[in-house]
Image: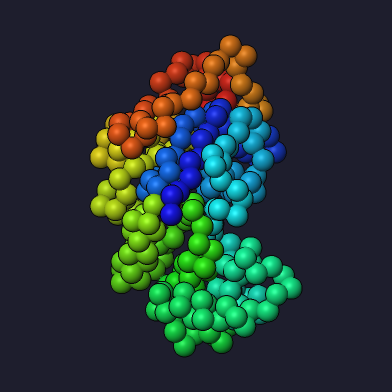
């Protein structure tokens, strides 16, 4: 199954017109396996929500090249799941069939597919368990099973391994590598840089803007990580609304370049850039 490309063209995302990610240019290639890393508050989760269309761009666009909305699966952070909601594991996982089955068709013909997805993540026998009784690792397994059923060309994972044990992480990483081997495009927000270096060939280092983007071993350098921390620490939440400079051109990058070499998207005139886009002077 070929994946799909995601192209960012002068993309600015934010809340109340204050930017969380701004003026991002670049392309995530079809079939690539990309980590998104950066300090807390760097805009990583916001970027995934922008790709999904949950947040409308303030400026620029996300181009889903050759993709429809149903081609993208999204696994949110565990904190976004209401574990008090009265739903069982079977029904949670079966939601992955929503686009194929719809709201009115019976799930009975698809029970085998749900059972296979639960078996793939080690949750056979958990079908009737309320999600509120699951451990953190079990809930993540159930959410991965839901993604399996979506059979999507692009898979977005927001902190998929946070607060779970090493065994569960290794098993879920096996699913991620399986998706990559099938040619799906996988993008994951992660905090464990050692894990990124071992498992993800491409990395976007984000600090409200792209600090570096390309081959992981060239992005995760001490200089780049220091710069990312400095940019986030200098951010001014009370700065004026983000507006593009009228004379600033956003040239798209060659899509073939992102898995081959890093691109320092931040090599602009920062004195002017910070005043315009929300960094403290």
Q: Could you tell whether 158 is left or right of 167 in the image?
A: right
Q: Residue at x 46, y 15 (%)?
A: 269
Residue 162: x, y in percent? 42, 62
Q: Residue at x 66, y 28 (%)?
A: 241
Viewer-closest of 242 and 177: 177
- Compared with 104, 129 (above or below) is below
Q: Residue at x 64, y 30 (%)?
A: 59
Q: Is residue 266 visible?
A: yes
Residue 1: x, y in percent? 43, 54
Q: Could you tell whether 90 is left or right of 207 in the image?
A: right
Residue 150: x, y in percent? 54, 63
- Compared with 205, 122 (above or below) is below
Disc tally is: 0
Viewer-closest of 213 and 271: 213
Viewer-closest of 192 and 202: 202
Q: Is residue 79 visible?
A: no
- Compared with 114, 100 (above or below) is above
Q: Could you tell whether 177 is left or right of 147 in the image?
A: left
Q: Residue at x 37, y 57 (%)?
A: 182
Give the residue at the far right of this rendering: 104
Type of colouring: rainbow
Q: Could you tell whether 32 is left or right of 133 in the image?
A: left
Give the residue at the far top of this rendering: 247
């Amino acid at each position: 199954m070929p994946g799909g490309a995601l192209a960012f063209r002068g993309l600015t995302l934010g809340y109340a017109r204050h930017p969380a990610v701004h003026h991002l240019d670049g392309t995530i290639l079809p079939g690539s396996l990309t980590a998104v890393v950066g300090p807390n508050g760097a805009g990583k989760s916001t970027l995934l929500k922008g790709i999904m269309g949950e947040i409308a761009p303030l400026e620029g666009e996300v181009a889903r090249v050759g993709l429809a909305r149903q081609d993208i699966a999204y696994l949110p952070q565990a904190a976004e799941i209401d574990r008090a909601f009265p739903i069982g594991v079977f029904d949670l996982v079966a939601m992955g069939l929503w686009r194929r089955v719809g709201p009115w068709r019976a799930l009975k013909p698809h029970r085998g597919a749900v059972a296979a997805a639960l078996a793939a993540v080690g949750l056979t026998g958990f079908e009737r368990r309320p999600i509120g009784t699951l451990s953190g690792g079990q809930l993540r397994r159930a959410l991965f099973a839901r993604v399996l059923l979506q059979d999507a060309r692009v898979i977005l994972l927001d902190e998929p391994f946070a607060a779970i044990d090493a065994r569960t992480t290794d098993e879920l990483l096996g699913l991620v590598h399986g998706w990559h081997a099938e040619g799906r495009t996988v993008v994951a927000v992660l905090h464990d840089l050692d894990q990124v270096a071992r498992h993800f060939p491409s990395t976007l280092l984000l600090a409200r803007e792209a600090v570096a983007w390309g081959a992981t071993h060239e992005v995760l350098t001490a200089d780049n990580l220091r710069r990312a921390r400095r940019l986030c620490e200098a951010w001014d939440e009370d700065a004026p609304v983000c507006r593009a400079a009228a004379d600033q051109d956003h040239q798209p990058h060659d899509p073939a370049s992102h898995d081959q070499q890093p691109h320092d998207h931040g090599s602009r005139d920062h004195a002017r850039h910070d005043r315009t886009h929300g960094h403290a002077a």
